[in-house]
Image: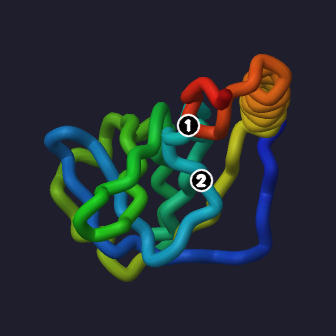
C-alpha cells in the first residue's frame, strides 16, 4: 500500500494539457527532478465541482524559462476526456512518502560520498 504525505495547504490549477497529460499549479509541494535527485511522484486530486479528478504524477520537471513545476502523468478517470477546463480548480496534493524518503536518503549518501572523495557539490574533483 502506498502511503502519501498529505498537506493541508491547497493549490489551484494554473494550466493543464492533455497532450502530453500535465498540470501546472499555482504552487506545489512536489520536488522536480534536479541536482541528481529524481522527482517526486504521487497524486493530485482536482476538485472540479462535485467531482474529484485524480491525476497520477509520474514525474515533475522545472521549466527553466518560467520557473514553473510541470507535473506529468495521467488522469485516473478515463471518462474524463471531455476537455473540461480545470484552470482555477482547487487541488489536494499527495506525495509518495516512501519514494520521497528513499530519494532523500540516496541523495544524502551520494553527497557525503563525494565529500569523502574530495569532490565539490558539482561533482568536480577538488585538489
Residue at 42% from the left image edge and 58% from the top image edge? 69
Q: Position of residue 57 (x, y in %)?
A: 49, 40
Q: How is the image coloured?
A: rainbow
Residue identifier under label 1: 122
The mark that comes first in sequence, 2 or 1, is 2
Q: Secondary structure at mark 2?
A: loop
Mark number displayed over residue 30: 2
Considering depth in this image, is 5 or 63 the residue closer to the camera?
63
Residue at 58% from the left image edge and 28% from the top image edge? 123
Q: Secondary structure at mark 1?
A: loop
| Res 101 → quadrant | top right
User: Is the residue under label 1 in contact with that under label 2 (CB below 8 Å)?
Assistant: no
| Res 102 → quadrant | top right
Q: Position of residue 4 (x, y in %)?
A: 78, 43
| Res 98 → quadrant | top right
Residue at 59% from the left image edge and 53% from the top image edge? 30
**Is residue 113 in view from this perspective?**
yes
Is 21 on the left-hand or right-hand side of 11?
left
Is 17 on the left-hand or right-hand side of 99?
left
Q: Residues within 10 Å of mark 2 (few under 14, many from 20)?
A: many
Is 56 on the left-hand or right-hand side of 94?
left
Q: Position of residue 22 (x, y in %)?
A: 31, 48
Q: How many marks?
A: 2
Q: Is residue 92 above or below residue 111?
A: below
Q: Residues within 10 Å of mark 1 (few under 14, many from 20)?
A: few
Q: Position of residue 29 (x, y in %)?
A: 64, 61
For the N terminus, the quadrant is top right
Q: Is residue 36 above or below residue 34?
A: above
**Is residue 98 in view from this perspective?**
no
Residue at 22% from the left image edge and 46% from the top image edge? 81
Amino acid at each position: 500500500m502506498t502511503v502519501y504525505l498529505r498537506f493541508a495547504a491547497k493549490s489551484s490549477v494554473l494550466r493543464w494539457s492533455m497532450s502530453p497529460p500535465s498540470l501546472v499549479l499555482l504552487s506545489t509541494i512536489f520536488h522536480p527532478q534536479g541536482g541528481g535527485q529524481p522527482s517526486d511522484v504521487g497524486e493530485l486530486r482536482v476538485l472540479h465541482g462535485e467531482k474529484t479528478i485524480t491525476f497520477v504524477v509520474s514525474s515533475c520537471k522545472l521549466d527553466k524559462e518560467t520557473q514553473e513545476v510541470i507535473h506529468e502523468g495521467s488522469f485516473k478517470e478515463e471518462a474524463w476526456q471531455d476537455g473540461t477546463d480545470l484552470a482555477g480548480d482547487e487541488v489536494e496534493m499527495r506525495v509518495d512518502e516512501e519514494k520521497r524518503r528513499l530519494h532523500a536518503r540516496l541523495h544524502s549518501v551520494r553527497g557525503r560520498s563525494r565529500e569523502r572523495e574530495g569532490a565539490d557539490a558539482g561533482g568536480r574533483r577538488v585538489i
